[in-house]
Amino acid sequence: MNEQPDRKDAPSLRDLFPHLSEKELVEVEETLCGYLGALWTIYDRISKDPVEYKKLKASLAEREGRKTKDKTP
């Protein structure tokens, strides 16, 4: 089960980048929203194609396996 953290517990952009001006924070938020929008579009297209979705899941599983191996002493 994927539990989402409470939104109140998530750091704000101001928390992450306290040194930025308000104008810079707006730019960071716009850029982040653009990237997330692009990622969502890519995922949405892949998830609607069974062959590509299977490839994505296999790739992610392989990557997770490599990360697990790297952590093993």
Image: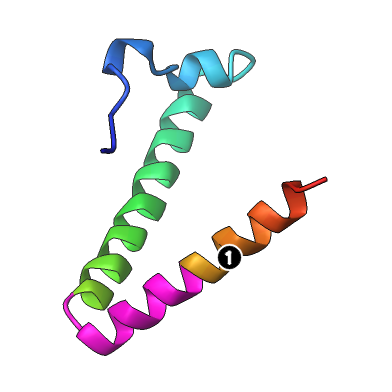
Give the mark count.
1
> Where's residue 69, x and y in %?
71, 57
- State the residue in front, 49 or 1: 1
Indicate whether residue 59 is drawn in magenta.
yes
- Local SS, label 1: helix
- In the depicted view, which residue is nearer to us: 7 or 12? 7
Vertical placement of residue 33 versus 40, above or below: above
Quadrant of the image for the N terminus?
top left
Left or right of residue 73, residue 48 in this image:
left
45 and 56: which is toward the camera:
56
What's drawn in magenta, residue-wise? Answer: 48-60
On the rendered image, what quadrant is the C terminus found in? top right
Task: Look at 64% across and 15% down and name the residue there.
Answer: 19
Hey, which residue is sitting farthest bottom in the picture?
51
In front: 5, or 40?
5
53 to 60, vertically: above or below: below
Question: Magenta segment: does it hold 65?
Answer: no
Outermost residue toward the front in this view: 73
Q: Amino acid at mark 1?
A: Arg
Q: Position of residue 34 (x, y in %)?
A: 36, 52
Residue 47: image x %, image y %? 22, 72
Is 18 located above or below residue 46 in the figure? above
Q: Is residue 47 above or below residue 15?
A: below
Snapshot quadrant of residue 65? bottom right
Q: Which residue corresponds to mark 1?
A: 63
Colouring method of the image: rainbow
- Name the residue located 44 percent from the left edge and 75 percent from the top edge: 58
What's the residue at 23%, 75% (across, down)?
45
Residue drawn 46% across the image and 22% down it: 13
Q: Is residue 69 left or right of residue 22?
A: right
Residue 48 at what x, y percent from top left? 16, 77
User: In the image as oriented, which residue stretches furthest toward the left?
Assistant: 48
